[in-house]
Image: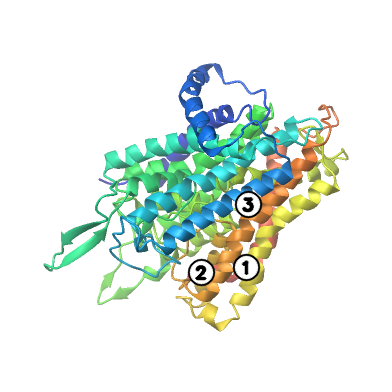
């Protein structure tokens, strides 16, 4: 069956995304209504969601009793930072212990190995995937979810430094947001043919040459669901979501692709509901959605066109590229669906892939890297909202100064104390990417890992450091990154790229929460107008371009201008 025209696939996807962002955004706003100290009320059409309290509340209370969590114990921003570090240290220790001892733990059915990534899922046992990686895939996005209502309190509190209870927010995020949606997605995947087992670990099959092949199987559907909904990335198979075990059909591909923007943009929409201004939330979604849709359009144009490297003629034979650039893409998805997935991956902190990005055209690769340059557009579950708000606060500050008004955002005065932390949060990505990049391109062991020379080889290293620093995790591939150098550099980038922004963002929340709320007046900057949306888009693009344009010129832009070679 022929694929629909690219414009149809593009339009259908973004229409569905808009509808789902609204519905899930209202649901998420309801989940954290009290924790955000908000006066939020469900729209009349969705009031039936209140019945879910009778289902979720007993589960949450049981978790509180078993774990000793006291949900009414309030925390300041310092208490929140401490809780984040302690909680994530626990996750790290759990992962380390299970990974180190997986050979002696049960359910160890490792069937194959690969070194194309820092680690491949096929190196891990079923037990490790189920009780280590799987658990972490729930708890790490729950960390980001827990910080959102704390930041909302910064604007809803009036001279009150208390930002709620981090652990209560984690529990609500897992029970009410991550588990239910992941369960539904997993059911869809299993209905489409995705594998879900924890009993065998491998499937033995006879090959066409009468040989025997052991194929890695495990809890594919469950891991894939939370991998995408929690913007985790990774996967059981080395080939990731291009495999039929993880992503068997065009429908499963559509569901998984939608999961990435919906789970991140819904938080941006919920922000407006929490602060009592849905129009503002819609304006913020519109601003970042325009960037996301525009870059996706660039990717579709790039990948539905021919791949210059494949324009060869030998013995009178040529490569038919009427369908677009099909190198390293699955025929069941095609170039358009692969391009939309690719931008959804680098437009969030989800590292899952359904095609190999190093085979993309120069124009397509540019769109991927520019999405990184904006700090992953909508970024990750929970933490994405906080990163977006750094640009929003910067825009409110600059916009007010441009028209001679007092810098203020949502009734809270913006002063130098908050703005210095905003600049740290925004500049963390450029520092973490560009400083190691300058060293890597002149360090022989680092350049030896490049699979391609010239512009594409430079782009491989740039992508690698973008992916680590922005907590994405995907790879342009082609780069032999499983070396001591890249493991150490990327490990440091991952840690600093996650915890430096979180710390300064909570510090901003603490500063703003202690301030008195000023009522909006004629002297206040309107933050729900087309003018504000345009200014916000401009600032995001200008900041990204100014900082990263030289590096992009040595990568995909240079490759594009040189004819794609």
Tell me the residue at 36%/56% (across/down). 236
Check disc 1: other Cα within 10 Å, few if <14, some if 14-19, many if 20+: some
Query: Which one is closest to the eye, mark 3 or mark 1?
Result: 3
What's the distance in space between the residues labelled 1 and 2, CA to CA?
Answer: 12 Å
Name the secondary structure under disc 2: helix
Residue 175 as seen in the image, left or right of residue 522: left
Apparent side of residue 450 relative to residue 419 in the rendered image (left or right): left
The earlier-in-sequence mark between 3 and 1 is 3
To which residue does mark 2 refer? 460
Q: Residue furthest left?
A: 210
Q: Earlier in the sequence, mark 1 or mark 2?
A: 2
Q: Tell which circle, 2 or 3, labels the residue nearer the N-terminal end.
A: 3
Give the structural element (helix, strand or loop) at label 3: helix
Question: Closest to the observer: 78 or 282?
Answer: 78
- Is residue 159 in sight in this rendering? yes
Give the color scheme: rainbow, by chain, secondary structure or one colour.
rainbow
Label 2 Cα neighbours within 10 Å, binned few <14 / some 14-19 / many ≥20: many
Q: Nearer the viewer, residue 540 or 155?
A: 155
| 42 vs 382: above or below | above
Camera-side mark, 1 or 2: 2
Position of 444 compared to 226: left or right? right
Q: Picture coordinates of residue 366 (x, y %)?
A: 54, 61
Q: Residue furthest top?
A: 44
Decide which of 393, 383 is in the foreground and name it: 383
Percent x, y for residue 470? Answer: 59, 57
Name the residue carrying label 3. 85
In the displayed structure, does residue 302 sit left or right of residue 388? left
Asked whether residue 18 appears in the rendered view, the answer is: no
Residue for point 62% across, 27% down: 33
Report which residue position mark 1 lands on: 551
Q: Quadrant of residue 110?
A: bottom left
């Amino acid at each position: 069956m022929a694929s629909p025209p690219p414009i149809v696939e593009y339009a259908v996807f973004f229409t569905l995304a808009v509808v789902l962002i609204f519905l899930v955004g209202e649901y998420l706003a309801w989940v954290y209504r009290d924790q955000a100290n908000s006066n939020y009320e469900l729209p009349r059409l969705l009031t039936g969601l209140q019945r879910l309290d009778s289902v979720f509340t007993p589960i949450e209370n049981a978790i509180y009793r078993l774990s000793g969590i006291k949900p009414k114990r309030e925390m300041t921003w310092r208490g929140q930072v401490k809780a984040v570090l302690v909680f994530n240290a626990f996750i790290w220790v759990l992962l380390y212990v299970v990974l180190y001892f997986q050979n002696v733990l049960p359910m160890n059915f490792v069937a194959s190995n690969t070194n194309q990534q820092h680690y491949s899922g096929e190196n891990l046992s079923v037990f490790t995937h189920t009780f280590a990686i799987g658990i972490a895939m729930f708890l790490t996005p729950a960390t980001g979810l827990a910080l959102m209502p704390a930041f909302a309190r910064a604007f809803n509190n009036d001279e009150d430094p208390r930002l709620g209870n981090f652990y209560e927010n984690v529990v609500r995020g897992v029970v009410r947001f991550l588990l239910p949606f992941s369960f539904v997605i997993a059911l869809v995947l299993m209905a489409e043919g995705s594998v879900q087992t924890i009993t065998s670990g491998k499937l033995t099959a006879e090959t066409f040459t009468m040989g025997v092949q052991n194929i890695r199987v495990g809890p594919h559907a469950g891991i894939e669901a939370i991998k995408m909904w929690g913007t985790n990335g990774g996967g059981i198979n080395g080939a990731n979501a291009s495999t039929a075990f993880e992503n068997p059909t065009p429908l499963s591909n559509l569901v998984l692709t939608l999961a990435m923007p919906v789970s991140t943009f819904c938080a941006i929409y919920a922000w407006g509901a929490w602060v009592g201004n849905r129009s503002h939330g819609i304006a913020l979604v519109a601003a970042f959605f325009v960037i996301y849709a525009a870059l996706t359009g660039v990717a579709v144009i790039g990948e539905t066109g021919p791949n210059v490297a494949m324009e060869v003629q030998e013995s009178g034979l040529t490569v038919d590229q009427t369908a677009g650039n099909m190198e390293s893409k699955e025929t069941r998805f095609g170039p358009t669906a692969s391009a939309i997935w690719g931008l959804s991956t680098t437009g969030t902190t989800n590292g899952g892939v359904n095609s190999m990005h190093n085979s993309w055209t120069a124009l397509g690769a540019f769109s991927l890297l520019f999405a990184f340059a904006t700090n992953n557009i909508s970024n990750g579950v929970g933490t994405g909202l906080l990163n977006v708000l750094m640009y929003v606060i910067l825009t409110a500050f600059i916009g007010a100064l441009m028209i001679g008004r007092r810098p203020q955002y949502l009734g809270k005065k913006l002063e130098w104390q908050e703005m210095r932390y905003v600049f740290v949060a925004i500049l963390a990505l450029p520092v973490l990417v560009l400083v190691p990049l300058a060293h890597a391109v002149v360090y022989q062991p680092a350049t030896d890992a490049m699979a391609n020379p010239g512009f594409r080889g430079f782009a491989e290293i740039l992508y690698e450091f973008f992916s680590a620093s922005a907590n994405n995790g995907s790879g342009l591939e082609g780069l032999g990154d499983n070396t001591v150098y890249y493991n150490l550099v990327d490990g440091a980038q991952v840690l600093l790229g996650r915890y430096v922004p979180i710390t300064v963002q909570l510090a901003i929340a603490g500063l703003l929460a202690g301030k008195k709320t000023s009522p909006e007046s004629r002297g206040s900057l309107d933050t729900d107008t087309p003018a504000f949306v345009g200014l916000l888009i401009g600032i995001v693009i200008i900041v990204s371009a100014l900082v990263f344009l030289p590096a992009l010129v040595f990568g995909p832009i240079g490759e594009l201008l040189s004819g794609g070679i």
